[in-house]
Image (cartoon, rainbow, N blue to C red):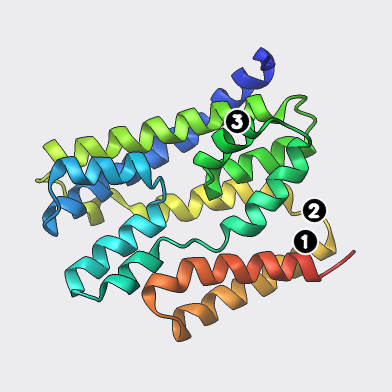
């Protein structure tokens, strides 16, 4: 039985994510149809994949006409490995059904919220993440549908996606940075991300930077 107070808090904390991801979904829907995807296929991709980074990269690659292997491997978000391992540690012993349901929506935003909730004493992290996932998933799919079916006249650049998501992730990360170790990890992670934009293919930049940051955080001890 899920704790109702934890679930309500997840809904409340997930509301800013709902707004940001909804706008992001509209931008993806517009871009997807502008690059040749059928509107229904764009929506299905958001229902099934639930990964903005992978889906945007996939659309960009489809335009460039790459081989099928590159397209298929674009969705391999390696950062999910350390994220899922940490999430398993946070929720403890749970049923397979619960674990699979939480893994269905494993995104940076709701993972960050859940990690922060674990440090602020939320009693039921499963209920909390489930609520945050509901907010994100509904916003992503709905936003994609709006962009794909009725948003052809929208200019994605005018939505300010770059600034919006930079601010969103800063808002999620800032409360977690407390010690010297945290600042060191953040500094090295930022440096590795900037280096990744210079040396990695576009499709691997986000995954590469996130994986490097996770490895740095694991390697540096207090």
Q: Is residue 79 above or below residue 27?
A: below
Compute the Cα span from label 3 to label 1. Answer: 34 Å
Task: Out of 174 and 38, give the one closest to the viewer.
Answer: 38
Label 2, on which residue?
178
Task: Out of 162 and 48, give the one closest to the viewer.
Answer: 48
Task: Mark 3 or mark 2: name the one nearer the start of the chain.
Answer: 3
Asked whether, in this view, residue 124 is left or right of residue 33, the answer is: right
Asked whether, in this view, residue 151 is left or right of residue 85, the answer is: left
The image quadrant of residue 139 is top left
Counting every numbered tag in the picture gives 3
* Mark sitting on residue 97: 3
- Label 1, secondary structure: give it: helix
Q: Are marks 2 and 1 in contact (CB under 8 Å)?
A: yes
Asked whether, in this view, residue 153 is left or right of residue 12, the answer is: left
Horizontal and vertical percent for residue 183?
Answer: 75, 64
> Which residue of the protein is positioned furthest toward the bottom in this rendering?
199
Q: Residue, x 26% and y 41% (percent of image)?
A: 44
Q: How packed is label 2: few (under 14 Cα within 10 Å), some, or many (20 or more)? A: few
Q: Is residue 193 above or below residue 9?
A: below
* Mark sitting on residue 152: none
Q: Residue, x 90% and y 64% (percent of image)?
A: 222
Task: Mark 3 or mark 1: name the one nearer the start of the chain.
Answer: 3
Q: How packed is label 1: few (under 14 Cα within 10 Å), some, or many (20 or more)? A: some
Q: Are marks 3 and 2 in contact (CB under 8 Å)?
A: no
The image quadrant of residue 219 is bottom right
Compute the Cα span from label 2 to label 1. Answer: 6 Å
Q: Is residue 54 above or below residue 125?
A: below
Label 1, on which residue?
182
Horizontal and vertical percent for residue 13?
Answer: 58, 30
Q: Is residue 12 above or below residue 68?
A: above
Horizontal and vertical percent for residue 162?
Answer: 38, 58
């Amino acid at each position: 039985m899920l704790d109702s107070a934890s679930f309500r808090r997840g809904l409340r904390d997930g509301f800013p994510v709902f707004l940001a991801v909804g706008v992001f979904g509209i931008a993806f829907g517009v871009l997807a149809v502008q690059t040749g995807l059928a509107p229904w296929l764009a929506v299905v991709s958001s229902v099934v994949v639930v990964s903005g980074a992978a889906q945007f990269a996939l659309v960009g690659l489809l335009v460039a006409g790459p081989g099928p292997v590159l397209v298929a491997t674009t969705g391999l978000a390696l950062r999910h490995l350390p994220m899922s391992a940490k999430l398993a540690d946070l929720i403890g012993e749970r049923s397979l059904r619960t674990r699979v349901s939480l893994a269905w929506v494993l995104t940076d935003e709701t993972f960050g919220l859940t990690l922060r909730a674990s440090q602020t004493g939320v009693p039921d992290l499963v209920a909390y993440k489930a609520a945050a996932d509901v907010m994100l998933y509904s916003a992503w799919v709905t936003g994609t549908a709006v962009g794909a079916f009725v948003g052809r006249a929208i200019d994605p650049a005018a939505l300010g996606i770059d600034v919006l998501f930079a601010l969103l992730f800063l808002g999620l990360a800032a409360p977690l940075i407390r010690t010297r170790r945290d600042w060191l990890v953040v500094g090295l992670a930022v440096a590795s991300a900037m280096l990744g934009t210079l040396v990695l293919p576009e499709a691997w930049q986000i995954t590469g930077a996130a994986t490097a940051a996770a490895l740095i955080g694991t390697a540096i001890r207090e």
